[in-house]
Image (cartoon, helix red, strand yellow):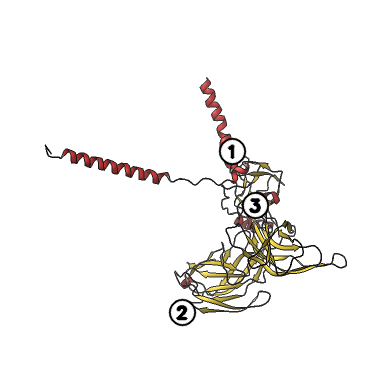
């Protein structure tokens, strides 16, 4: 009977142990209060506590779970996207560039450009720096997005109709036409016909937050299969009326620079999607600033804004004060640096502005639901919710939006233990293979020695 009681207890505890597994991967959870029970899809606005808990620079450790601890389909969106507002569309100026040589480590050409004071491109010329680039077709594109002030959600391209098209493109972004970074929006353009039917894919879609840079470069992976582009349209996120900027005010430390100048360094306490920056100083002042950021001390500093002039002049009422500065791109970096072009009167306070993002999740599984965040072991799986939101907007009308959900008071899950990276897995199969080989070799050697001994002539 005693043994039977132990088995019954183990069976009763098994489901609880299974449920504890997913939750042990996260530091905290926030119970979700739904505005209605039949919403199907819900949107919840992230607050400061979620951003402070998140560890991933892409918020991959923010997810939604049901009452049993099983994750449900979820995705992080910019604040305006799940509101089902039609994106704004504008034509982008573009310039044709030579394609990269196949297998070449360099572009094979240098870019000569004339830029207006506002960053707008006046003229672009590509000069060949290698013999094999002179004959390359002009199939790469340089897009001028310097006047765009909202994140670009997607690019829609038009081309001259002709032969069948199936061309993959790589996308890069830059703010100075010198340093380029890869963008996760690499896409494919398709224009195929068969049996009187046509298949067309014109859009290159970026991630749910969108892309914000002064210049974009599209390069075909195969220059010979590229399209003859005739127009480029950018789909822009429309700022939501109910999503005003929120500000984090940081106090920094003065750091002496090698060139004799002075900088001020700051540390942000969470993975906030920073979009604007401002500098606060007491009294009247006018200084030109540069703002850089990086995620950790092993990385180099990246320019985010400037040079720009921040000023404050006392007068009637509140006086006059400069506006906040838009960053070159949305950044979740932890470390920030301010540099001024002159003596700084006092200790500048760095103000970083952001709009809270939203998590959209599908009411799948068993309610109630919870938001979880903070993990060095778990990562949110990719989901088709961006396409789902777009499809529901088309079927239910342009005013449709996911039902509202709100965050309740957080409760601890695994706490700091969830933030410890797991130990690297050991490849025991390799060790076992080597062990088998060593043992096998020893057996062969032993067998050979035994044969030698048995074959010795008598009396030797």
* Front position in the image: 214 or 408: 214
Secondary structure of the residue carrying tag 3 is: strand
* Distance of label 2 from label 1 (alpha carbons): 62 Å
Do tag 2 and tag 1 residues touch (Cβ < 8 Å)? no
Label 3: how many residues lie within 10 Å, few (<14), some (14-19) or many (20+)? many
The one of 386 and 110 positioned closer to us in this rendering = 110
Residue 119 screen position, x and y as percent: 66, 74
Query: Could you tell me which secondary element the residue under label 1 belongs to?
Result: helix
Determine whether 284 is above or below 433 in the image: below
In x, y percent, where is residue 117? 68, 76
- Residue 233 visible in the displayed image: yes
Sequence-wise first label, 1 or 3: 1
- Tell me: residue 70, above or below residue 77: above
Indicate the secondary structure of the residue bearing disc 2. Answer: loop
**Splitting the image into 4 quarters, where does residue 399 fall?**
bottom right
What residue is disc 1 on? 20
Could you tell me residue 273's position as x and y percent?
66, 58
For label 3, the residue is 360
Q: Which mark is residue 231?
A: none
Which residue occupies the extreme top position in the image? 1
Residue 407 drawn at (x, y percent): 70, 47
User: Within 10 angstroms of label 1, few (less than 14), some, or many (20 or more) residues?
Assistant: some
Q: Which mark is residue 135?
A: 2
Of labels 2 and 3, the one closer to you: 2
Separation (CA) of disc 1 from disc 3: 24 Å
Q: Residues within 10 Å of mark 2 (few under 14, many from 20)?
A: few
Residue 149 placement: quadrant: bottom right
Q: Total marks drawn?
A: 3
Of labels 2 and 3, earlier in sequence is 2
- How far, Cα to Cα, is label 2 from label 3? 49 Å
Q: Report the side of 265 relative to 457 (left or right).
A: right
Q: Residue at x 57, y 49 (%)?
A: 379
């Amino acid at each position: 009977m005693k043994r039977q009681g132990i088995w019954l207890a183990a069976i009763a505890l098994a489901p609880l142990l299974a449920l504890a597994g997913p939750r042990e991967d996260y530091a905290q959870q926030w119970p979700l209060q739904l505005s209605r029970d039949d919403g199907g899809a819900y949107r919840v606005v992230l607050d400061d506590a979620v951003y402070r808990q998140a560890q991933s620079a892409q918020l991959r450790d923010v997810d939604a779970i049901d009452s049993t601890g099983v994750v449900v389909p979820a995705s992080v969106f910019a604040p305006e996207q799940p509101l089902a507002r039609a994106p704004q569309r504008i034509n982008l100026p573009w310039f044709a560039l030579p394609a990269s040589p196949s297998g070449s480590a360099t572009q094979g050409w240098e870019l000569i450009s004339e830029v207006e004071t506002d960053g707008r491109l006046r003229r672009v010329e590509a000069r060949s720096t290698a013999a094999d680039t002179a004959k390359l077709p002009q199939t790469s594109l340089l897009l001028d997005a310097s006047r765009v002030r909202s994140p670009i959600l997607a690019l829609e391209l038009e081309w001259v109709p002709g032969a069948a098209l199936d061309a993959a493109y790589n996308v890069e972004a830059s703010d100075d036409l010198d340093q380029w970074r890869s963008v996760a929006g690499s896409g494919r353009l398709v224009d195929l016909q068969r049996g009187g039917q046509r298949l067309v894919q014109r859009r290159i879609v970026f991630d749910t937050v969108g892309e914000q840079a002064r210049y974009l470069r599209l390069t075909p992976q195969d220059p010979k299969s590229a399209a003859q582009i005739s127009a480029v349209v950018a789909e822009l996120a429309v700022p939501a009326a109910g999503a005003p900027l929120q500000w984090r005010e940081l106090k920094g430390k003065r750091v002496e620079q090698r060139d004799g100048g002075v900088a001020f360094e700051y540390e942000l306490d969470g993975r906030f999607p920073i979009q604007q920056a401002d500098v606060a100083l007491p009294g009247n002042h006018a200084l030109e600033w540069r703002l850089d950021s990086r995620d950790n001390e092993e990385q180099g500093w990246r320019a985010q804004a400037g040079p720009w002039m921040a000023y404050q002049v006392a007068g009637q009422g509140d006086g006059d004060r400069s506006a906040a500065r838009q960053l070159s791109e949305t950044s979740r970096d932890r470390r920030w640096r301010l540099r001024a072009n002159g003596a700084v009167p006092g200790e500048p306070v760095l103000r970083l502005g952001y709009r809270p993002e939203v998590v959209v999740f599908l009411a799948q599984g068993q309610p109630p639901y919870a938001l979880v965040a903070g993990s060095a072991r778990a990562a949110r799986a990719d989901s088709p919710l961006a396409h789902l939101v777009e499809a529901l907007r088309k079927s239910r009308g342009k005013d449709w939006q996911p039902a509202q959900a709100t965050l309740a008071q957080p409760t601890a899950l695994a706490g700091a233990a969830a933030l410890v990276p797991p130990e690297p897995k050991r490849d025991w199969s390799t060790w076992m293979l080597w062990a088998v080989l060593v043992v096998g070799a020893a057996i062969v050697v032993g067998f050979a020695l035994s044969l030698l001994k048995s074959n010795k002539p008598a009396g030797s």
